[in-house]
Image (cartoon, rainbow, N blue to C red):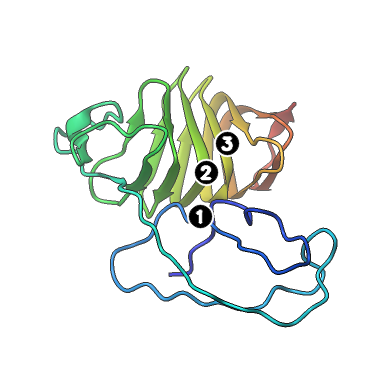
Amino acid sequence: VRLIPSSSVDPPYIGEWQEISRTYGSIPAGDVTILVGTARPGDGDPALTGSRMRVDNISLNTISGAIWDNDTLDNLWGTANNWDPDQIPTVTTPVTIDDGSGIPLVEADHEVASVWLTAGQLTIGADNTLTVTGGFDADGTLALENNSRLSAASGSIAAATIDGRASIAVPIDGNLEVLSLSPAAGELVKEDAGTLTLHGDSIEVAN
């Protein structure tokens, strides 16, 4: 599995020797291989021109995350026992949702660090907001009900459906892509100054 960083390079390249870091929202179980290489010419500001790299050390820090298990079978995001460990994810929590454990429903406003939907569907219920401070990556389907809202800083969503009027917010310098958009009927409102790339059926988009 090739992982996409949920953060930009920190700090930005400045064309000199420097220490940098990247953040990855969700890492699957098993062995992890880290590939290190030189930057692409033209990266950074000012643009990099060198081809050398020095590595003093690499550290890997893990943050405990939450895995959806739907133990109560009520499908509600806000039920603590539907997560492993048994607590509702918070703004510092990376979230992983696998297929086969029902369809999670965001039934209230929630905020998490990142979301990785490996398959299946995640539904943001009517009048509710899911805020993701990092990356939202979905190999499954995101379903947006009427007056629902997703806010995510980055990521790629394989498929999304819209029923009614829904919003997607991408903060400044953010970049979110929806690879297949299939609105049942309605309107998508794009919020904030980041980049939102849409592919799929025709839909009315309002700013």
Front position in the image: 186 or 125: 125
Q: Mark 2 highlights which residue?
A: 134
10 Å neighbourhood of mark 2: few (<14), some, or many (≥20)?
many
Q: Quadrant of the N terminus?
A: bottom left
Q: Which mark is residue 183?
A: 3
Q: CA distance from mark 1 to mark 2?
A: 9 Å
User: Which amino acid is tagged 3?
Assistant: Pro
Q: Residue at x 30, y 48 (%)?
A: 64
- Farthest residue to the top: give it: 127
The x and y percentages for residue 137 are 49, 51
Q: Nearer the viewer, mark 1 or mark 2?
A: 1
Residue 190 in which image quadrant: top right
Crowd tier of the residue under label 1, counting other residues whose Cα lies within 10 Å: few below 14, some 14–19, many 20 or above: some
Ranked by sequence position, the earlier of labels 3 and 1 is: 1
Q: Can you identify the residue that label 1 sits on?
A: 23
57 or 112: nearer the viewer: 57
* Residue 18 x, y percent position in the rendering: 66, 64
State the mark number for residue 155. none
Residue type at the position of mark 1: Thr
**Callouts 3 and 2 close, C-beta under 8 Å:** no
Residue drawn at 66 percent across, 79 percent down = 53
Q: What residue sits 35% from the left and 23% below the top?
A: 107
Residue appearing at x 42%, y 33% in the figure? 91
Circle 1/circle 2 CB separation < 8 Å: yes
SS at badge 2: strand
Q: Residue furthest left?
A: 72
Q: Earlier in the sequence, mark 1 or mark 2?
A: 1
Specify whether 36 is left or right of 121: right
Label 3 to label 2: alpha-carbon separation: 25 Å
